[in-house]
Image: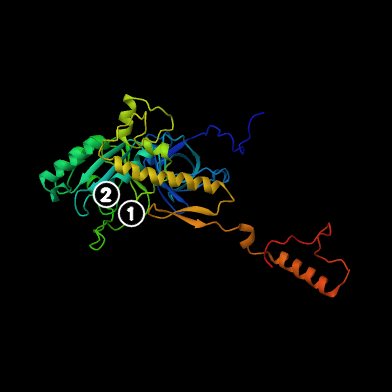
Amino acid sequence: MAPSEFDDTVLAEPRASLWGLVVAIQANYYRVKLDKNSDLLNDESGQILLCTRRARLRKTGQQVMVGDRVQVEAVDWAGGRGAIAAVGPRRSVLDRPPVANADQILLVFALAEPDLDPQQLGRFLVKAESTGVPVYLCLNKQDLVSTATRRYWQEQLDAWGYPATMISLQEDETVQTLLPRLQGRTTIISGPSGVGKSSLINWLIPQASLRTGAVSGKLGRGRHTTRHVELFELPGGGFLADTPGFNQPDLALTPLVLGQCFPEIRSRLAEGVCQFNDCLHQDAPGCAVDPHWSRYDFYLTLLKEALEYQEGQQQQRDPDAPLKLRMGEQGQQRQEPRLQTKKYRRPSRRHQKQRLDYLRHDLDGSGDSLDSQSSDGDWPEDDGLS
């Protein structure tokens, strides 16, 4: 039997197919840039439509993300509106920031104002590595530091496994060295606040006109200026995704995943095999990872956090555990008492009335049946509310 036109499980071949790229999401509306090579109404190709999501996508739990390729129907060309009917397959998915089909992450840090913090940089690198998307490192504001400082950081990052490109937005020729790597790709620009991410996008795409902010004098950190994820098209092809800055990324990783987020560990494992498959690389006998590398102490610090996170996840799955794990906005972990849901749940009005009826019945000594009495004649279960 052929599927009907209302069967949501099968996407019938449309008479005229419109596809585009989701470039921004605000509330329940999606800005979709139509393909320039669209077969339908070529005069309208490249136009940006304000779209909603079809009800069938909501009912099936189909999320629409920035970077998604989507099919658009019910287009109102005069009003610039449409409806998203289907979502294409994804090459990659990031949850924070929520972006689909990214080709690479450009991690931007500043050499000064704010000063480069190796611990903060290390956490951002590990978070970026955990996504599985290739990571590329860019250090901004090189004009504010000495040649010796630039050389020091170049050598340090080479040892970590991250050759970095150093730029200054005051020196156009340095920024132009980024263009070959960005063109033709969808790049997520990430990093802490105040390092110049929005200023970099304004240099690369002047029409973006992103709002920028100064560095806080008291905290030595940047102020948040980007509030949501948005894609901006590069003049030579490709897209940049500006993302909200985070001063401390959330590292919710298990110990085994953490080890794969360090290029130093990956390179050593490529040369040898640990004696145990679940080795945590803590200078154990038979471990292929030599602990004499510059970030080993930093790895042990994150390993401790990963073990605590793993223990917390196990507690979350145990309903009888006295504590539960909470993650703060800056990635810090804390444990809170687990309340007994039944004991602390607010009773319903029906249950309160039922208990009062039984109490009155007990005081009066009446044998009459109660309107709210249960069908089997049992008294309501004592749930600790009395």
Question: Residue 166's mark?
Answer: none
Quick one: SS at disc 2? helix
The spot of residue 208 in percent (x, y) is: 28, 50
Total labels: the figure holds: 2
Q: Which residue position is annotated with label 2?
A: 197
At label 2, counting other C-alpha atoms closer than 10 Å, the crowd grade (few under 14, some 14-19, many 20 or more) is many
For the point 20% across and 40% down, the residue is 156
Extreme residue toward the left, this view: 147
Q: At label 1, which amino acid type do we have? A: Thr
On screen, residue 290 versus residue 384, left or right, reads left
The spot of residue 303 in percent (x, y) is: 38, 42
Q: At label 2, which amino acid type do we have? A: Lys
Quarter occupied by residue 32:
top left
Q: Which of the two residues, 168 or 152, is positioned nearer the viewer here?
A: 152
Q: Is residue 326 above or below residue 18?
A: below
The spot of residue 371 in percent (x, y) is: 82, 66
Quarter occupied by residue 255:
top left
Q: Which residue position is annotated with label 1?
A: 226
Cα distance, mark 1 to mark 2? Answer: 9 Å
For the point 37% across and 54% down, the residue is 330
Extreme residue toward the bottom, this view: 364
Res 47 seen here: no
Residues at circles 1 and 2 in contact by the CB criterion of under 8 Å: yes
On screen, residue 218 versus residue 373, left or right, reads left
- Quadrant of the frame with the C terminus: bottom right
Q: How is the image coloured?
A: rainbow
Q: Which of the two residues, 133 or 344, is positioned nearer the viewer here?
A: 344
Quarter occupied by residue 90:
top left
The spot of residue 346 in percent (x, y) is: 63, 64
Quick one: SS at disc 1? loop
Q: Is residue 77 above or below residue 36?
A: below
- Quadrant of the frame with the N terminus: top right
